[in-house]
Amino acid sequence: DRSDGSVFAQTTAADGTDGYYSLLVVNKESPLKSVDDVLKNAAGLRFSNGDPNSTSGFLVPGYYVFAKNNADPKKIFKNVVAANHESNALAVANRQVDVATCNNEAISRLEIAHPEKAAQIREIWRSPLIPSDPLVWRNSLPESTKKKIADFIFGYGVKGDVAHAKAILEKLQWGPFKPSTNAQLVPLRQLELFREKSKLEANAEMPAAEKAERIKKIDEALDKLSL
């Protein structure tokens, strides 16, 4: 939107999957079994949200779990804090909070680093697939440069010194890169626009005419992304 760049590749997980999932997790001893349980009992629950800049920790659950149920986490829970994925997982394992956002990649890392803590965590909600991290290049790069970059990226772990490359990818818990386009980000851009629209609709101090105009622009942007 701002810098004339394009998605040309994306990472894959070590098992070959090309995305990951946002989760709601609770302690394995918790009586909570579903999102409905969480929403019905929210007034007595301690909730740890993700970092506001996190797609899987904040934006995705914010849309699918809360916005779609017309619920504001800041208003419905007994107590709300925010932390990164690992901290949220540990807080649930240690019963410092009742429910938290996380993602499956963080749980996988915790199973390796602290299996005893991972064993204390239970998943009660999983999002639709979130595309894995994109690689972006500047559109104005010479085609010859783009080709060199693409040949390296798509050959990494596939051609040349495969063993060395695979060893590095394994440390990152990645598989080989795969081609992608800007279309990969459309669902996330829709989520971001929806969040912006929700904030505007909840703003009681903004003049009605200004609010209506800004919401109209967001709706137009959403319509374009739906084409």
Image (cartoon, rainbow, N blue to C red):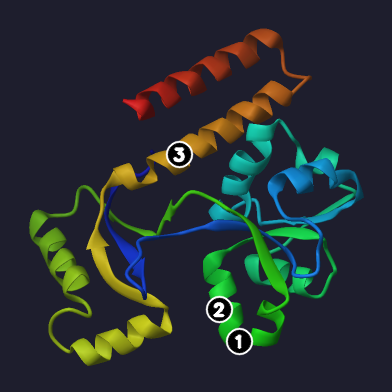
Residue drawn where x is 85% and y is 68% of the image: 96
- Mark number displayed over residue 68: none
Left or right: where does residue 26 sit relative to residue 186? right
- Verify CB contact (< 8 Å) between mark 1 and mark 2: yes
- Mark number displayed over residue 109: 2
Q: Amino acid at mark 3?
A: Arg
- Could you say where residue 45 lies in the image, as x and y percent from the top left? 87, 53
Query: Which is more toward the observer, 68 or 166?
Result: 68
Q: In this view of the protein, can residue 110 be seen by the observer?
A: yes
Label 2 secondary element = helix
* Separation of marks 1 and 2 at Cα, in angstroms: 6 Å
Residue named by callout 3: 189
- Mark number displayed over residue 113: 1
Q: In this view of the protein, can residue 4 be seen by the observer?
A: no
Give the mark nearer the N terminus: 1 vs 3. 1
Q: Amino acid at mark 2?
A: Arg
Task: Give the label, 1 or 3, closer to the camera.
Answer: 1
Task: Give the label, 3 or 2, closer to the camera.
Answer: 2
Q: Residue furthest top?
A: 209
**Mark 1 Cα shell of 10 Å, populated few (<14), some (14-19), many (≥20):** few
* Separation of marks 3 and 2 at Cα, in angstroms: 28 Å
Residue drawn where x is 71% and y is 30% of the image: 70
Give above or below for 7 relative to 121.
above
- Could you say where residue 73 lies in the image, as x and y percent from the top left? 77, 43
- Could you say where residue 26 lies in the image, as x and y percent from the top left? 74, 63
Residue drawn where x is 26% and y is 48% of the image: 181
Q: Quadrant of the C terminus?
A: top left
Give the mark nearer the N terminus: 3 vs 2. 2
